Image (tube, rainbow, N blue to C red):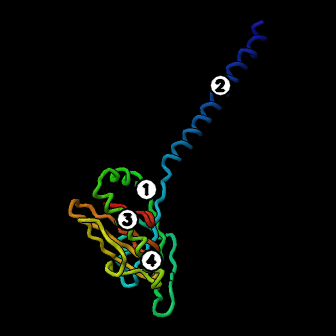
Amino acid sequence: MTDATTPASQALPRQLTVLIVLAVLILAALLFLVFRAARTPEWRYMVIAPPDQMLEGELNRVGAEGWEIVSARRATSGSGDYASAAYELILKRPGVDATAKIAATQASDPTLAAMRSDLRNLITAQEAYFADNVTYARDISKLNYAQSAGDSVTITFASGIGWSATVKNTGTTKTCGIFVGAATPPVPGQPEGAPMCQ
């Protein structure tokens, strides 16, 4: 009778052992996938188009900030006297999306809100100028534009394919910036057309 019960009693521990091994393998695979997903970097992208005479310096600057070139092309805009060309570079670097965190931090500051509003209004003024001149204004005095009290808006770059600007205010040490089209973002990593401060 002992011989008949031995194979049956041994089969149960073998089945249990197989189930435990399978459960451990499945758990290990799930943990591997979770940890692998947690380590996968989110990519931040930026498009810049520095003037030719500033290309090398701009590449060195963004390279020092950890940006890598994904794509580059020669972009031209306009024709005749209004033609301009620049290398348009698409860059990437690993990172988290800090844009929302920065915007949330700055939302409660009325000085920064006025500065960002001035930059959004500058978009409208620049587009009106472009419609008449097929290029963006390099000088703020050429625009139908008024800035808030204490603000000092400076157009840092303008061509037929894009522009960038910054604004400072006597009430804060921060500088806000914006860019449209093929221009270098004043605040690294900022999206096109979205005023950001640093």
Q: Earlier in the sequence, mark 2 or mark 3?
A: 2
Label 4 is placed on what type of residue? Ala
> Could you tell me which secondary element the residue under label 4 belongs to?
helix
Apparent side of residue 2 relative to residue 96 in the rendered image (left or right): right
Cα distance between the residues tagged 2 and 1:
44 Å
Cα distance between the residues tagged 1 and 4:
36 Å
Crowding around mark 4 (Cα neighbors within 10 Å: few <14, some 14 to 19, many 20+) is some
* Label pair 4/2, CB-CB below 8 angstroms: no
Question: Which numbered mark, 1 or 4, is in the foreground of this view?
Answer: 4
Any part of residue 176 in sight: yes
Q: Which residue is mark 1?
A: 95
Q: Which mark is residue 188?
A: 3
Q: Which residue is mark 2?
A: 17
> Could you tell me which secondary element the residue under label 2 belongs to?
helix
* Label pair 3/1, CB-CB below 8 angstroms: no
Near-viewer residue (147 or 29): 147
Crowding around mark 1 (Cα neighbors within 10 Å: few <14, some 14 to 19, many 20+) is few
Residue 46 location, quadrant:
bottom left
Residue 23 at x, y percent in the picture: 62, 30
Near-viewer residue (19 or 135): 135
Tell me the quarter of the image containing the C terminus. bottom left
Identity of the residue drawn at 40% across and 78% down = 50
Q: Which residue is mark 4?
A: 128
Label 2 is placed on what type of residue? Thr
Q: Earlier in the sequence, mark 2 or mark 1?
A: 2
Q: Earlier in the sequence, mark 3 or mark 1?
A: 1
> Could you tell me which secondary element the residue under label 1 belongs to?
loop
Question: Which numbered mark, 2 or 1, is in the foreground of this view?
Answer: 1
Cα distance between the residues tagged 3 and 4:
27 Å
Cα distance between the residues tagged 4 and 2:
76 Å
Label 3 is placed on what type of residue? Pro
